Image (cartoon, rainbow, N blue to C red):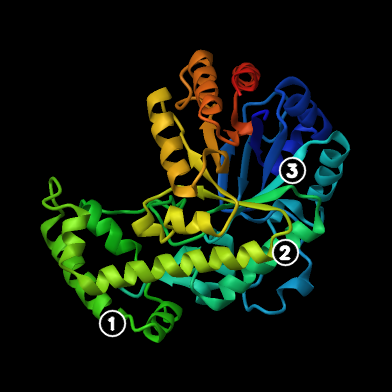
Amino acid sequence: MALDASIWCYLWDLEDEGMDRALDVIQGELGATGISVAAAYHSVDELRPHDGVSPRWFRSAGGLQFQPHGSRYCGTRAKPVVAEWLRSRNPLERLAESCAKRGLALRAWVVCCHGSAMAARNPALATKDVFGAASETWLCPVNPDVQEYLRALIEDLTHGYRLAGVELEACGFPGGYHTHRHEKMGFAPGAVGRLLLSLCLCESCRQAAAKEGIDAAAVERAARVDLEAILRSGGPEREAASIEAYLAEREPLRAFLAWRGRRVAALIGQIRKACAGTLTAMRSGDPLMTGAEPAQVAERCDGLIAQAYGADEAALERIAKQAAAETGAANRVTVGLNACAGYARDAASLVRNVGRAAELGVAGVNFYNYGMIPPARLAWVQQAIRYGRRQG
């Protein structure tokens, strides 16, 4: 079976470059079989390298990259936020029509819980840390209104546009993502501190955990004590104990983390039912922090996207094989590659990586990100796709 090769894209880049021109390059020159376009995104500050694109700097607070059908969101208090750059336009409709005419598979790439625009509009639905501070960038995946919003969002997209499928990103708790703020921290939290800071103890988490016999209050007390100790000491110069050893002595926290994993997996199961197309989830971040345990997630969707940004062939093979073990088969894995500067060293290394992915029998490869890849590097992607097809 031929290797599927898709390009991650931002709708604003396609619009400003000229949609038909960009699709001609993606399909006709690069040889891609599909594109994955951001349909719900967080804040962005992008310097764009393509010829003729204006403005050079694209800045947005984020939000939905299409015009939602309000009737689908009646069952949730979460209010959808449309990205301000769209105004009343809906270029996703034109993109869907163009892709259908060309026979180019169109997938929606949805950043689920990470979004400053949504958190600002819906502050009561944000995660809360052990100190009671609400996040300005992250919605809680356990909150019933957030769950219904995400279900409605996927239903809206897959029933309203001609999509081959949906790719989920950040469908869980914070996993060390950037916030687009200049945070100040004069201590080293270490792995334990980062885990404890990732915990959400909002009202929804407390209530839902209590219904399943989880003592969230005990988790909060223990986490605060340990975090206060880290704050006083400034954090470890090197880790004194592994996360495993730390958790071995803290049964309430172990139970709480396992419960979070079950809740995130259940949410993806709800989304699967609403999705009229394939559903894949990005495998990224520490599962202890995100709650997105890969094997549990894979049971409830059609596959995983394993990111191998900057990896050499050996590292790519380890990443792909790990994801194959979690999904049960290599053909349920898509490998994510980054062709931008700082990740792909040269054309030869990108070509080798795609060839190795094809030899391993993965379903496909996704390249990040069309509007950010300098024009000279697009030829690298073209070479890699051609080679991958021959190897596959």
What amino acid is found at the position of numbered circle 2 in the picture? Glu
The residue located at (52%, 42%) in the rendering is 329
Using the image as rendered, state which of residue 61 and residue 361 is in the foreground. Answer: 361
The residue located at (31%, 79%) in the rendering is 216
Q: Give whichever of discs 2 and 1 has the lower sequence position.
A: 2
Residue 155 is marked as: 2
What amino acid is found at the position of numbered circle 1 in the picture? Ala
The residue located at (56%, 48%) in the rendering is 303
Quadrant position of residue 104: top right
Marks 2/3: CA distance?
16 Å
Residue 217 is marked as: 1
Horizontal side of 42 relative to 160 (left or right) equals left
Q: Percent x, y for residue 40?
A: 64, 55
Q: Is residue 313 above or below residue 75?
A: above
Q: Give whichever of discs 2 and 3 has the lower sequence position.
A: 3
Q: Percent x, y for residue 116?
A: 53, 60
Q: Secondary structure at mark 1?
A: helix
Marks 1/3: CA distance?
45 Å
Q: Give whichever of discs 1 and 3 has the lower sequence position.
A: 3
- Residue 257 in sight: yes
Residue 106 is marked as: 3
What amino acid is found at the position of numbered circle 3 in the picture? Leu
Q: Tell me the crowding category of disc 3: few under 14, some 14 to 19, or many 20 or more residues within 10 angstroms, Cα based.
A: many
